[in-house]
Amino acid sequence: MKIVTTPMCEEIVRLAGVSDYVVNKHPTSEDGDLAILLSESKVEMDAVPIKINTPQQVFESIREVSKIAGKELSDEVILAFFEEYELSKKYLNSDFKRDVNVKVYSEFLKDIVLDAGFNIDSENFRYVIYPDYLKDKVTETENLVEIPSHNSISKNPFEKIELRYAILENLI
């Protein structure tokens, strides 16, 4: 089976033990038999959609892709990937609750904000959290928190988590 993945998912594919794959930003059936890509992406071929916004999503995505690759990794092996990433490890399987309401301007950020323990409330909020690509759409003017999106940040999912969660932790 020939696997094709997008640049954003390549690290997950690599960590999952897949060594023979092709990277293409817009996969087609001519590139391979199976695409591994972000869940928001749509392709005209068999695909495994994954999410990599939160530490738990990264963990589950590595697990799922390793199964597909026929190299099912144990939890211990997957956990080892988190070792050098403090916030990724901290928020993996955590249940933080913070008494801070925020308004969120993006679906992918909702996963992160909820995982970090914030409450989402579009009416009564302390901060407005938005991805950099929606900066021009934000109507509020105070307590704005810009989060780097997929295109303006490292492709490494752990490095993304570290940066995004650090920004959110500074709000507390």
Image (spheres, helix red, strand yellow):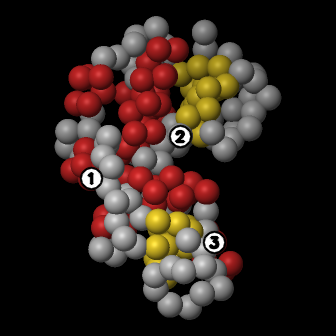
Residue at position x 54%, y 58% in the image: 110
Report, in whole angstroms, how far the alpha carbon at label 3 lies from the one at label 1. Answer: 25 Å
| Element class at badge 1 | helix
Q: Is residue 163 left or right of residue 84?
A: right
The percent position of residue 90, horizontal first and vertical second, equals: 24, 49
Q: In the rendered structure, which amino acid carries the disc numbered 2?
A: Lys
Of labels 1 and 2, earlier in sequence is 2
Query: Dot 2 corresponds to which residue?
Result: 51
**Rendered position, 132 above or below 16:** below
Q: In the rendered structure, which amino acid carries the disc numbered 1?
A: Leu
The percent position of residue 136, horizontal first and vertical second, equals: 66, 80
Of labels 2 and 3, earlier in sequence is 2
Residue at position x 44%, y 30% in the image: 60
Residue at position x 48%, y 42% in the image: 52
Labelled pair 1, 2 in contact (Cβ < 8 Å) = no
Viewer-nearest residue: 151 or 103:
103
Query: Dot 1 corresponds to which residue?
Result: 87
Which of labels 3 and 1 is toward the front? 1
| Element class at badge 2 | loop
Report the disc number at residue 134: 3
**Rendered position, 79 above or below 46:** below
